[in-house]
Amino acid sequence: MKNAKSVLSVKFKSNHSPEKLMQICHEDLDIFRNVPGLIEKYYIGEEGTGAISGIYLFETQSARSDFWTSELAATIPERYAVIPETLRVEEYEMAIVLNDKVSA
């Protein structure tokens, strides 16, 4: 998947309405398009609990680390009205990707 090597998962519940969260996510698209080393970001919602997650795919572990310690990442709790006790952050290294195409 475009040489993704590192994954960040940020999951939480929010005090915002689902409509407000979608508005914020759309407003932030261009900001996230410019994060160095970020290949892809998925905004996903958990049907059973209403929790939302951001799944970030990075080129390198250092790009992931740089993002998570950035001013932009520091704004996430307030901007998305994160309920603190629901916040779950997980970091992963890419192991195997189904359907990954390697250019020759």
Image (cartoon, helix red, strand yellow):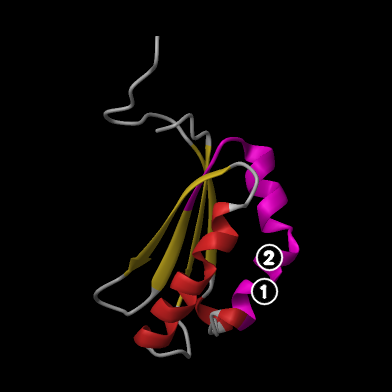
Q: Is residue 28 left or right of residue 26?
A: right
Q: Residues within 10 Å of mark 1 (few under 14, many from 20)?
A: few
Which of the 4 quarters of the picture holds residue 59?
top right
Q: Is residue 27 left or right of residue 1?
A: right
Specify start and end residues of the magenta stretch as a single range.
Answer: 56-78
Indicate the quadrant containing the C terminus: top left, top right, bottom left or bottom right.
top left
Asked whether 43 falls inside the magenta stretch, the response is no
Residue under label 1, please give it. 75
Q: Is residue 61 above or below residue 34?
A: above
Asked whether 59 falls inside the magenta stretch, the response is yes
Residue most extreme to the top: 104
Residue 27 is tagged as none
Amino acid at circle 1: Thr
Q: In the rendered structure, are the residues bearing label 1 and label 2 in contact, judged by CB atoms less than 8 Å apart?
A: yes
- Say which element carries label 1: loop
The percent coordinates of residue 25 (x first, y second) are 46, 72
- Whole-angstrom CA distance, mark 1 to mark 2, is 5 Å
Amino acid at circle 2: Leu
Q: How many marks?
A: 2
Main secondary-structure element of the magenta-colored stretch: helix
Residue under label 2, please give it. 72
Query: In front here: 83 or 81?
Result: 81
Query: In front here: 104 or 54?
Result: 104
